[in-house]
Structures are given as C-alpha cells and as structure tokens.
Image (spheres, rainbow, N blue to C red):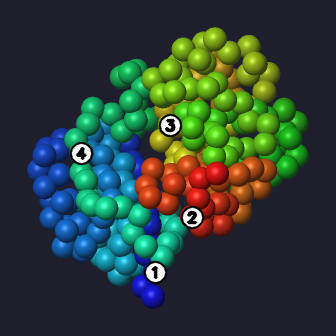
Amino acid sequence: MTQIFNIAAYKFISLENLEQRRLALLEQTQAQAIKGTILLTPEGINLFLAGTQENIDQFLLWLRQDPAFADLEVKYSVSPDVPFKKMLIKIKREIIRMNHPTIRPEAGRAPAVDAQTAARWITKGCDDTGRPIVLLDTRNDFEVDAGTFVGAIHWHLTKFTEFPQAVLEHKDELAGKTVISFCTGGIRCEKAAIFMGEVGIENVYQLDGGILKYFEETGGVGYQGNCFVFDERRTLDPTLQPQPLT
C-alpha cells in the first residue's frame, strides 16, 4: 500500500504577484498529483498538502528554489489515504485573520520555545528560572474540545479575531507567569505572542511549530486528547495517527 505523506508549513514573508504565484503553485501541485490547501497572502504562505513521498519531495524541491521559501520548515505526518478531495489555492488578506495589521511576524518574531524545552517546563510546572508557566490555547472552542494541554487556559473563542479583546480582559491572569501560547501549527500562537508582548504582558513565548511539531518531537507530553486538523482526518493523536472525533 502506498503511504501518503501529509505536510503542513507556513512562513510570514512579504509576497507580491499573488495571482502569478497561485498559477505556478497550481501547475506544480497538479503535475505532482498533490491535493490540499494553500493560502497566499501579502503577509506570507500557509499550506496543508498530501501526496506520495516522492511527489511531495519534488514539490518542496521546486518550491524552495524560490528565495522567499528557501528555508521553509515543514511538519510531516503519514496516513493511508489522501485526506483532501481536491487542490485549492486561495488568495487572502491574512494567513490567519486577526484584524490587527500592525502585527507583522516578518518584522520580528516573538520569543519561541522549542518542543523539548516546553515539555521539560510542562513537566516541572515552571521555566528554568523557577517562574510558573501558563499554557494558553489560542484556538477556537471546537478545536479545544478535541484535546489540549492539561490545565491550559482558553477563552472560549469562536474565531481568532476575538483573541485581542480576550487578552485585554484577562491580562491579570497572566501576570508574573511565563506564558506559552500554542495552536495547531504555529501561526495563531505566533501572532498571539506578538500581540501579548505589545500590550505589556511579559515573559511570553510561542510554542515553535505548534501542537503538531510538539507531537512529532515529544509524543505529546502533558497533552490530553487529540489535535483537530482541518482535513478529512479530523483529529490526530500524539503519535500523529488519525482518530475519529468523539
């Protein structure tokens, strides 16, 4: 049986000629029989794709020839089937809508904590200075319902545009703690961490690569349940295997 490789990747970088890029991406994905979703925006790219290992490798080889994507980092998982019905490439205003155009990760990322360090802090309950940690889930309610870190804070968001106001209403909960913001693949927590820093919350980190990278590198230390993904697999367990929604 042919094993399907699923990749998730994003990069915040200023992009122009979006329609030209869309057509080139469509041509390449069709040539490699790849299915999935790509979002192209003036602030960068976000992609979720599936195909055979050979075809995915060939596509990434082509994509990384573009200087804008030469250092694109990719998260991998496998599945027995392609979890997408078609190839869809959309041009949008933001990779993930926040309605705060001054939040530009390309101009400078918030501090990030890698998966192994995060797992160590989660196990100890504090960072390397002894400051207690708070895990902040930046995802929407229905995603949190599938699984999250034990003891994580979430603010019952229905869409990410609600996050900035929720931060302002709950700032006091985060004072004096080390905050690790997290999401599925890293996009939302990257914007979230920058916003929190700009409104005066100290000691904020983003979980580098999100939950998917955390699963890949740690097996899900401290995580309870599965991770919702936006394809036909629906959720992935900490071994990155598809699981039905319960």
Q: Earlier in the sequence, mark 1 or mark 2?
A: 1
Q: CA distance from mark 1 to mark 3?
A: 30 Å
Q: Which residue is mark 3?
A: 188
Residue type at the position of mark 3? Arg
Q: Is residue 170 above or below residue 104?
A: above
Q: Earlier in the sequence, mark 1 or mark 3?
A: 1
Q: CA distance from mark 1 to mark 2?
A: 14 Å
Q: Which residue is mark 1?
A: 3
Residue type at the position of mark 1? Gln
Q: Is residue 66 above or below residue 106?
A: below
| Secondary structure under the numbered disc 4 in the rendered image | strand
Q: Are there few (<14), some (14-19), or many (20+) residues within 10 Å of tag 4?
A: few
Q: CA distance from mark 2 to mark 4?
A: 26 Å
Q: Position of residue 152 (x, y in %)?
A: 74, 36
Q: Position of residue 140 (x, y in %)?
A: 55, 33
Q: Which residue is mark 2?
A: 242
Q: Which residue is mark 4?
A: 90
Q: Earlier in the sequence, mark 3 or mark 2?
A: 3
Q: Where on the picture, by quarter, is residue 136?
A: top right
- The residue mark sitting in front, 2 or 4, is 2
| Secondary structure under the numbered disc 1 in the rendered image | loop
Q: Earlier in the sequence, mark 3 or mark 4?
A: 4
151 or 125: nearer the viewer = 151
- The residue mark sitting in front, 1 or 3, is 1
Q: Is residue 44 visible?
A: yes
- The residue located at (46%, 81%) in the rendering is 3
- The residue mark sitting in front, 3 or 2, is 2
Q: Are there few (<14), some (14-19), or many (20+) residues within 10 Å of tag 2?
A: many
Q: Earlier in the sequence, mark 2 or mark 4?
A: 4
Q: Position of residue 52 (x, y in %)?
A: 37, 78
